[in-house]
Amino acid sequence: MILLTIQMKVLSEKRKELSQAIASLMGSIRKAKGCRRSDFWQRVEDDNEFSLVEEWDTWGDLLHYLKSERFRVFLGAMTLLREPYEMKFHTVFQPPGTDGVRGFSKSSQFPKRTFRNFESKEGF
């Protein structure tokens, strides 16, 4: 599995526009071949910081998505940021026999930060 994380810091006056643009893409991203999960999060401590976290079955599926029209639309929304976004790729390994293990997390992707799921937040 491949994990894609994109962290964004938006201009305050462009926060609603960025949120709406990315939220409008979420449905089609989630339906893309190989996409296991795609979540758009807003940092609780800073309303102008967002993260997009996606899980992909294979590198091939992810590369196909990165060449897609929907990703080009996403990149167009990046013009609303106050600084360049940070994109990271991670290969995730799940040891055999750990499918049923719950509540175990050795590390956090976002240390010392708290995020809320954008889709569950009402109003901006």
Image (cartoon, rainbow, N blue to C red):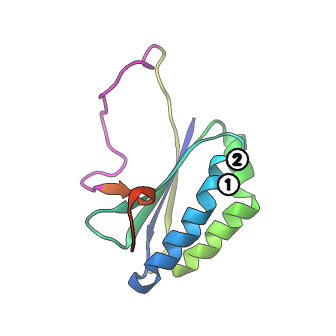
Image: 3 above or below 71:
above
Q: Position of residue 49 (x, y in %)?
A: 38, 68
Q: Which residue is mark 2?
A: 32
In-image side of 102 versus 22 (left or right): left
Q: Position of residue 78 (x, y in %)?
A: 56, 74
Q: Is residue 89 magenta?
A: no
Q: Nearer the viewer, residue 2 or 116?
A: 116
Q: Position of residue 45 (x, y in %)?
A: 25, 66
Q: Position of residue 97 (x, y in %)?
A: 45, 13
- Which SS does the magenta portion mostly show? loop
Image: 57 above or below 23:
above
In-image side of 40 versus 73 (left or right): left
Q: Which mark is residue 69?
A: none
Q: Quadrant of the C terminus?
A: bottom left
At a point 33% along the width and 71% down the height, the residue shown is 47
Q: Which residue is mark 1?
A: 28
Instruction: Please tell me how crowded label 2 is: few (under 14), some (14-19), or many (20+) other residues with Cα within 10 Å.
Output: some
Residue 111 in view in this figure: yes
In-image side of 34 versus 120 (left or right): right
| Residue 117: quarter of image | bottom left
| Residue 79: quarter of image | bottom right
Magenta stretch bounds: 97-114
Query: Is there a contact, CB below 8 Å, between mark 1 and mark 2?
Result: yes
Image: 29 above or below 122:
above
- Give the secondary structure at mark 2: loop
Instruction: Please tell me how crowded label 1 is: few (under 14), some (14-19), or many (20+) other residues with Cα within 10 Å.
Output: few
> Which amino acid is tagged 1?
Ser
At a point 33% along the width and 56% down the height, the residue shown is 115
